[in-house]
Image (cartoon, rainbow, N blue to C red):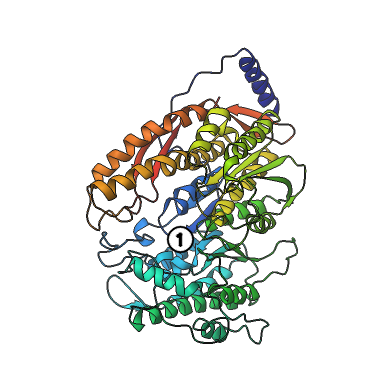
Amino acid sequence: MKQAKRLWAAALALVLLAGCAPGRTEPLPYPEPAASKPGKTIAYVPLDDRPDNVERVEYLAESLGYALAMPEKVLYRTALDGQPKNFDSLQRGEPWSLFTWVLDQEAAGCDRYILSLDQLHSGGLVSSRCLTGDELELPGGGTVNPSQMLENLLAKLAEDGNNVVWLLDSVMRLAPTVGYEGGTLEEYNALRAYGSEPRETLEGREALTFANVCLSYRCGADGEPLPEPEGFGPELLEGYLAARERKLRLSDQVQHILSRPGYENFRLLIGIDDSSLEDCIQKNEIAYLRQGLRTEEREDGKQLDWLLSGVDDLAFKAVARLYLDETGWLGGRVCVQYFGGTEDQPACEYDFQPLTEIMEEHLAFFDLTEVESAELQILVLTQPEDESKKGTYHKQLIGALREYEKAQRPTVLIDASNGTYGTEVYKALTREAELGYLIAYSGMLDMAIVTGTALSHGAARYAVLKTGENTDAMDRAWARSLADSILKDFCYKGVVRNDLLAYIRNDLGGDPNNFWSPELDREDLLSRLEEGMEKETAPVIRNLEQSRFLSSLEEEPEERRWGGIALENYRFPWDRAFEIGMDIRLGEFR
């Protein structure tokens, strides 16, 4: 096998030296045969039905040789106001059926689980921000107690010592979702301002109790009661604080369960949802939950529980860490370079830590040690310290990227600039670099999510390349994940989405955050999406199709080339313009 790879690499080098790369291979039908090996199934209950929680998790799992088993979409789907409901009655997922589904997987012999607690407790992330009661309604009538159901489920999964169970939880963000259960932008702004107010700091186990944390919600840093949001009735604030208390109580319950004997194969990963730059309402919640983490190391040296920034990347981190643990990952060395000069600051208003601190925490999660020189490279584009030097910053980035392409170094690219360079940096990358040579890319969101996403994919791919155990199907799943991230950022979020936003607001008088309120012609919007993407993706797809990629680092770097790429089945998963889904067909690699 290794000899064949070397012969292929030598033949490819001769072709490239001759100046004529192999022709484009025609994209194959999608979906392709599963990439997983027998018995490598992960039972996965997603946070919700957005692409980052569904198809992109599926790509990552398949790139590591796993099959991802998921329940029916109707059981975990979120519906915004005015949109068709699940079972004709629910805007959220249905925890009772999800508990049943997980038990069915256990009965069938599954021994790997990644379970979103916000989905199992509340029917999804959005719903977890506004539910206040202990009972949840069932679509056919009656209620269930999610707290009791979860305790029973975890006890059942703990009976099998072969099970590995990742539980994903979150610290509630500063305000609930606009356009869900009647929530308005005015209410969101009022509650976010209230949540952003500094609170008194609780320190030590005697002070840092559940009851005291809940009492701290209402008081400022001086211990005096905070004024209620003006222009709203008391029910708005009471509902908000009750939802926070419920959320914290359920998280507290899980930590108490996991502290008992018999739960050593369970791992808890808590993410901090969109945060404020201020010393806010989340402060004591974070400290309280951090206090309950099982941070002692096991016999294999792995920490059991983690609390990190970012929520939409939780499943990525769990899948990658599961793979690293199973393959005996001993950690790695990485060189991190920043371009732009603002890495010592939060990247946007939704980050509460500087880039460097977020990076350090995530590197520790993946057992990566930052050094000045290493095989694995991470390049981070920050917001520009000097606006007049934007061109210089992204030229330096591209120069480093091309240097590592020539040196056959695995490289992760993170765009933490929050759009401050416009589309120029994407155009320059498309013109001057081999985008397909990256092992991972992420950008266009707050830094916490971007970092977790990029490092999950990057660390996992690097580990695969070092073992040399990847298959063609695993390589193809990895390529889909990389292409999905690059094409959506460079083309949709950078250009096409802005055109759609303007069209919906200015021409249609609609709401780009919900195509049902008022109801818009979704076929028209889909047609505009397809037309815009066909135009904008063309140069990026050509770049990818002409790119090499690293296929192994087991002994020495080995390369292959991308095949053809075709995009189809575009969709708006939440019937809003914020994100899109699409299928990616790939030709045979060369």
Furthest residue in direction top, as rendered: 18
In the rendered image, residue 367, in percent from the top left (x then y), is placed at 71, 54
Residue at screen point 44% across, 79% down: 241
**Looking at the image, residue 376 lies above or below residue 432:** below
Pointer 1: what residue?
A: 47
Furthest residue in direction front, as rendered: 388
In the rendered image, residue 307, in percent from the top left (x then y), is placed at 61, 66
**Looking at the image, residue 58 lies above or below residue 244:** above
Residue 95 horizontal side relative to residue 18, left or right: left
- Residue 520 in view (yes/no): yes
Quick one: 158 or 442, which is closer to the camera?
Answer: 442
Q: Local crowd at mark 1 within 10 Å, few (<14), some, or many (≥20)?
A: many
Residue 5 horizontal side relative to residue 537, left or right: right
**Looking at the image, residue 267 lies above or below residue 503:** below
- Residue 258 in view (yes/no): no
Disc 1 marks a residue whose amino acid type is Leu
Quarter of the image where the C terminus is located? top right
Q: How many marks?
A: 1
SS at circle 1: loop
Res 65 quadrant in image = top right
Quarter of the image where the N terminus is located? top right
Residue at screen point 24% across, 43% down: 523
In the rendered image, residue 583, in percent from the top left (x then y), is placed at 40, 40
Quick one: 469 or 533, which is closer to the camera?
Answer: 533
In the rendered image, residue 45, in percent from the top left (x then y), is placed at 46, 60
Quick one: 153 or 363, which is closer to the camera?
Answer: 363
